[in-house]
Amino acid sequence: MNKELMTVDRAFSALSKERGMNRAFLSYVAEDAVMLSPNKMPIAGKDKINALFQRNDSDKEFTWEPLYADIAESGELGYTYGTYTITTDGETQKGTYVSIWKKDSGGKWKFVLDSGNDGLVEP
């Protein structure tokens, strides 16, 4: 397990809780990122992802907890996966996610692929 990427993913979640999911996703998205959602075509590119996150998110709390992270030997590519919780108007949904991360030219981790699955049922 890689502590560096776990810390990055936890900071991403903390920003979502503190400032909203829109700001968090737009802070951590790579220029060429892709988001995958069930029953939808992939959303590719920061501009299209930016358009997705322009809706009001003040009624939601979206947080997640990485369960595992690893980084390639090159140190430039990695992934995290874990569980998420979305609370809207007192209703809570849980699911799982995976994010693929890449270091940008400034050495900061940005996600290049993000996907989630809803309907988490714990064993």
Image (spheres, grey):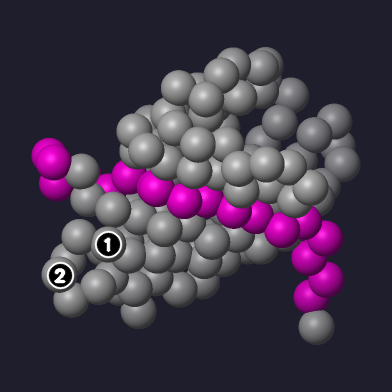
Please provide percent x and percent y for residue 95.
72, 59
- The 10 Å Cα crowd at callout 2, few under 14, some 14 to 19, many 20 or more, is few
Please provide percent x and percent y for residue 13.
49, 46
Please provide percent x and percent y for residue 48.
52, 25
Picture quadrant of residue 104: top left
User: Dot 1 lies on which element?
Assistant: strand
Q: Return the residue nearer the eye: 46 or 81.
A: 46
Please give the name of the residue rendered at 86% of the width and 37% of the height, measured from the top-left corner: 90
The region drawn magenta spans 105-122
Q: Which residue occupies the extreme front position in the image? A: 41
Q: In this view, does 87 lie above or below 55?
A: below
Answer with left or right where residue 76 lies relative to residue 15: left
Which residue corresponds to mark 2?
A: 74
Please give the name of the residue rendered at 67% of the width and 36% of the height, measured from the top-left corner: 61
Which residue corresponds to mark 1?
A: 77
Q: Which residue occupies the extreme bottom position in the image? A: 123
Please give the name of the residue rendered at 39% of the width and 70% of the height, measured from the top-left corner: 69
Tell whether position 112 is magenta. Answer: yes
Q: Return the residue nearer the eye: 81 or 11.
A: 81
Q: Can residue 119 be seen in this view?
A: yes
For residue 106, the mark is none
Quarter of the picture holding the N terminus: bottom left
Answer with left or right where residue 59 lies relative to residue 51: right
Please provide percent x and percent y for residue 42.
61, 43
Quarter of the picture holding the C terminus: bottom right
Tell whether position 87 is magenta. Answer: no
Q: Does the CB distance between marks 1 and 2 fall below 8 Å?
A: yes
Amino acid tagged 2: Ser
User: Dot 2 lies on which element?
Assistant: loop
